[in-house]
Image (cartoon, grey):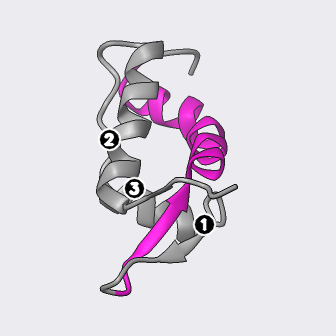
């Protein structure tokens, strides 16, 4: 079975959709945020595309978004301080 992999832009779009499911006013997840998740150890690179750009697995992306959600929502004034 092959796993669907997502580019940084696709990963950011999916994470934004998930965040906005929780709150319509949640800030968008950027490609830069995806790179930060990798740097901070929240997200592993699952492969590389033809140009050598990182690709991410859906399950890993969901775990990283969940791990960073509460802080991100607090930064935009949503949730407990």
x, y percentage for residue 38? Answer: 55, 67
In this view, which residue lies farthest toward the front?
Answer: 1
Residue pictured at 44% horizontal, 74% vertical:
54
| Other residues around mark 3 within 10 Å, as few (<14) / some (14–19) / many (≥20) | few
Do tag 1 and tag 3 residues touch (Cβ < 8 Å)? Answer: no
x, y percentage for residue 52? Answer: 38, 86
Under circle 1, the secondary element is loop
Q: CA distance from mark 1 to mark 3?
A: 10 Å
> Where are the magenta residues, as a range?
52-77
Under circle 2, the secondary element is helix
| Other residues around mark 2 within 10 Å, as few (<14) / some (14–19) / many (≥20) | some
Among numbered discs 2 and 1, the one appearing first in the sequence: 2
Mark linked to residue 13: 2
Q: CA distance from mark 3 to mark 2?
A: 11 Å
Would residue 16 be found to the left or right of residue 59 on screen? left
Dot 1 corresponds to which residue? 40
Would residue 72 be found to the left or right of residue 43 on screen? left
Q: Quarter of the image holding residue 3?
A: bottom right
Q: CA distance from mark 2 to mark 1?
A: 20 Å
x, y percentage for residue 4? Answer: 53, 53
Q: Which is nearer the eye, 73 or 45?
A: 45
Residue pictured at 39% horizontal, 77% vertical:
49
Q: How many numbered discs sit on the rendered protein?
A: 3
From this view, report whether residue 22 is shown above or below residue 48: above
| Other residues around mark 1 within 10 Å, as few (<14) / some (14–19) / many (≥20) | few
Dot 3 corresponds to which residue? 33
What main secondary structure does the magenta stretch of the protein show?
helix
């Amino acid at each position: 079975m092959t796993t669907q992999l997502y580019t940084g832009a696709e990963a950011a779009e999916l994470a934004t959709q998930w965040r906005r499911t929780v709150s319509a006013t949640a800030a968008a997840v950027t490609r830069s945020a995806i790179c930060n998740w990798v740097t901070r150890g929240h997200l592993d690179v699952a492969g590389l595309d033809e140009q050598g750009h990182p690709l991410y697995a859906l399950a890993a992306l969901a775990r990283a978004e969940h791990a960073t959600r509460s802080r991100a929502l607090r930064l935009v004034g949503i949730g407990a301080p």
